Image: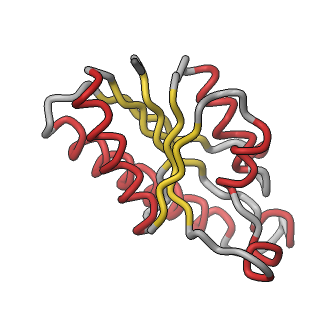
Amino acid sequence: MYGKIMVAVDGSKNADLALAEAVQIAMACGSEIAVVHVIDNSYLKCNPLFIGTDELHTALRADGEALLKAACDLVEAQDIPCTTRLIDEPAAMGDISTVVEQAAQEGCAELLVIGTHGRHGMHRLLLGSVAEGLVHHTKLPVLLVRA
């Protein structure tokens, strides 16, 4: 049914649950899994000359690489083929959903799995939502996994 499933991870419990669900689907369908992590560069919007930016970026990149390795190790432990992609581009500033959608299209994903907080009302308005952005803009099937 789905040859390639893409899962977006960010280190949250929601993302862990989304990955676990993607693994179950991949096992049932014989799919491969692509895991993507987007480094949120929105801190550059505040002050691109902020002292310590290089150190912060290095730490965010290392964290992203560790997240991807852990996710792929979990997937491969189930004998499911896994690829990873760390997205570290200025285009990701504040528009992570668009970047994830583009990665899914470039990677020929047939299903996009993402965790969601399930927030509503003012919380959703104030915090925004990568999941909501994906649901409203992508043509790919999207599976939202609530924590």
Q: What color scheme is it?
A: secondary structure
Q: In the image, 6: left or right of 101?
A: left
Q: Give coordinates of residue 112: x percent, y percent.
A: 53, 36
Q: Give coordinates of residue 116: x percent, y percent.
A: 55, 62
Occupied quadrant, residue 42: bottom right
Q: In the image, 19: left or right of 8?
A: left
- Could you tell me which residue is drawn at 49 percent across and 43 percent down? 113
Q: Give coordinates of residue 86: x percent, y percent.
A: 51, 41
Vertical position of residue 61 compared to residue 24: above or below = below
Q: As rendered, which of 102 and 25 lies closer to the eye?
A: 25
Q: Residue furthest bottom?
A: 122
Q: As rendered, which of 136 and 62 lies closer to the eye?
A: 136
Q: In the image, 75: left or right of 61?
A: left
Q: Quarter holding the C terminus? A: bottom left
- Could you tell me which residue is drawn at 78 percent across and 44 percent down? 136
Vertical position of residue 104 compared to residue 67: above or below = above
Vertical position of residue 50 compared to residue 136: above or below = below
Q: Quarter holding the N terminus? A: top left
Q: Give coordinates of residue 64: x percent, y percent.
A: 46, 54
- Could you tell me which residue is drawn at 70 percent across and 39 percent down? 99
- Could you tell me which residue is drawn at 14 percent across and 37 percent down? 78
